[in-house]
Image (cartoon, rainbow, N blue to C red):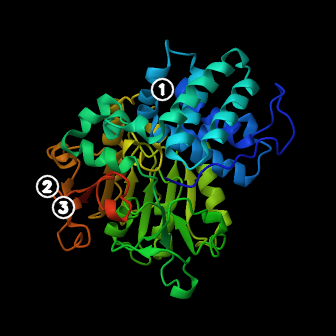
């Protein structure tokens, strides 16, 4: 159970269909519809929500959390609804029902509020003919309560079958971890005094400060000054394993949103951050400007496959585009977006990996790729001068379970579940001959 969604309906007048306005649920509806109907990412759907434009930060945060809960438990919620529906309703109606079920079974919203606000939501969204259905179905779900979940394999229901199969033996531990809301992970600026660290956190062995799920980072003292930044514990590992030193010239390819760039820069490296997508580069620049981070970092729009530095580099860190399914713990929407074309992505990663390392004389390259990628095998015999440089047990002494027999790094949400888990990442290191 996580903190419920407050019933703020009516707080801001009436909606366009006459029902009381309720920005939290209106935004959540837009998000879930954006994911299911248009295959848009959660954050994109939030940004494009008309209801979110005039909403305050509290409503947006509550809506984000409600929508994420729907997506995290969508398979289970759908199975709960099945006995109460004679036929499949239109998608917008199903979205309203899913929001209601999520509040009744997975949040601590009172049942009467969950039902009432769902009916109002249906009316505001022009679904008046279905308002009675929404009311009747959700009342029955509320009457069943936790009993509606008995006998359901929630872990399996909440993961698409193709992905469950792709995960193999890891499927169940990973899926069970995905059912829990992710905590807030922070990377601290080196040398930050303990007295200036956000309170209420636990320092993980990997050096990440972990705070409880639902913590609003913008409310933490020191955030605006760049004393720390949001970065999953697994996402922080590659830059740490690269072990940047002051004065080294390092390129961070596919750099947005900037967490790894910041790690390299605050370590004293001379960083050139490359990002192809204008929108993501703008976000990276915004993050950099808003924080008191080193000013010597170069932020460049460009394609990692064609970009060349003006002088030799000491190291390259490449976060190659991938399916993003490893981030489902924090971004449950990726589970329900159209299956990515993994082959095309892999080919793109090969091109970037092969080209990015050319300027590195005897340098070190960190490459992140999809979780099941055979990076070392695919590299041998390519004639590009790269040799696998496996990670050692000493380097991963604090997380030995993430070291594969080939010497690569592989994390997944099923690791450290007692401490809140982590994202799924694959990282391989190469050295140029």
Query: In the displayed structure, would residue 314 be above or below residue 194?
Result: above
* Residue at the spot of label 3: 390
Please report the residue visible at 52 percent of the width from the left and 59 percent of the height from the top: 258
**How many residues crowd around disc 2 within 10 Å: few (fewer than 14), some, or many (20 or more)?**
some
Q: Nearer the viewer, residue 263 or 47?
A: 47
Between discs 2 and 1, the one toward the N terminus:
1
Dot 2: what SS?
Answer: loop
Query: Mark 3 and mark 1 in contact (Cβ < 8 Å)?
Result: no
* Residue at the spot of label 2: 406
Instruction: Tell me the mark number nearer the camera, choosing from 1 and 3.
Output: 1
Q: Can you give x and y, in whole percent of width and height, for residue 321 in the image? A: 41, 42
Query: Mark 1 and mark 2 in contact (Cβ < 8 Å)?
Result: no
Instruction: Tell me the mark number nearer the camera, choosing from 2 and 1.
Output: 1
Query: In the displayed structure, would residue 99 be above or below residue 60?
Result: above
Instruction: Tell me the mark number nearer the camera, choosing from 3 and 2.
Output: 2
| Residue farthest along the right direction in this orientation | 13
Between discs 3 and 2, the one toward the N terminus:
3
The quadrant holding residue 90 is: top right
| Residue farthest along the front direction in this orientation | 143
The C terminus appears in which quarter of the rendering? bottom left
Please report the residue visible at 54 percent of the width from the left and 32 percent of the height from the top: 98
Query: In the displayed structure, would residue 407 be above or below residue 398?
Result: above
Query: Mark 2 and mark 3 in contact (Cβ < 8 Å)?
Result: yes
Whether residue 62 is visible: yes
* Residue at the spot of label 1: 81
State the separation of the CA atoms marked 1 and 3. 49 Å
Whether residue 372 is visible: no
């Amino acid at each position: 159970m996580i903190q419920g969604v407050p019933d703020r309906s009516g707080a801001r007048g009436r909606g366009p269909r006459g029902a009381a306005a309720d920005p939290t649920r209106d935004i959540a509806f837009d998000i879930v519809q954006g994911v299911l109907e248009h295959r848009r990412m959660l954050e994109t759907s939030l940004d494009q929500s008309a209801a979110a434009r005039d909403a305050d930060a509290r409503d947006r945060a509550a809506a984000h959390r409600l929508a994420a809960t729907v997506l995290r438990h969508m398979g289970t919620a759908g199975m709960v609804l099945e006995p109460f529906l004679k036929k499949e309703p239109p998608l917008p109606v199903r979205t309203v029902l899913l929001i209601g079920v999520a509040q009744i079974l997975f949040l601590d919203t009172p049942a009467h509020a969950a039902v009432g606000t769902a009916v109002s939501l249906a009316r505001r969204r022009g679904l008046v003919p279905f308002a009675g259905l929404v009311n009747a179905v959700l009342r029955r779900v509320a009457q069943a309560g936790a009993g509606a979940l008995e006998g359901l394999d929630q872990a399996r229901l909440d993961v698409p079958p193709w992905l469950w199969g792709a995960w193999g033996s890891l499927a169940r531990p990973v899926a069970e971890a995905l059912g829990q809301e992710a905590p807030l992970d922070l990377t601290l600026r080196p040398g930050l005094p303990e007295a200036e660290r956000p309170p209420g956190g636990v320092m993980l062995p990997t050096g990440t400060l972990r705070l409880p799920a639902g913590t609003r980072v913008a409310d933490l003292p020191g955030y605006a000054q760049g004393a720390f930044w949001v970065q999953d514990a697994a996402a922080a590992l590659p830059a740490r394993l690269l072990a940047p030193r002051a004065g080294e010239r390092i390129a961070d390819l596919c750099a947005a949103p900037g967490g790894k760039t910041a790690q390299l820069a605050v370590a004293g490296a001379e960083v050139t951050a490359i990002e192809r997508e204008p929108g993501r580069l703008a976000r990276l620049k915004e993050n950099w400007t808003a924080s008191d981070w080193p000013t010597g970092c170069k932020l460049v729009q460009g394609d990692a496959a064609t970009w060349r530095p003006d002088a030799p580099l000491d190291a390259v860190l490449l976060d190659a585009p991938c399916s993003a399914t490893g981030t489902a713990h924090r971004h449950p929407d990726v589970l329900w977006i159209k299956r990515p074309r993994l082959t095309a992505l892999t080919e793109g990663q090969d091109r970037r990996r092969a080209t990015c390392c050319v300027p590195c004389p005897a340098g070190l390259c960190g490459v992140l790729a999809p979780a099941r990628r055979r990076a070392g095998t695919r590299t041998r015999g390519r004639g590009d001068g790269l040799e696998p440089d496996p990670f050692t047990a000493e380097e991963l002494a604090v997380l030995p379970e993430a070291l594969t027999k080939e010497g690569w790094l592989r994390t997944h949400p099923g690791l450290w579940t007692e401490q809140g888990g982590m994202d799924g990442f694959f990282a391989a290191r190469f050295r140029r001959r």
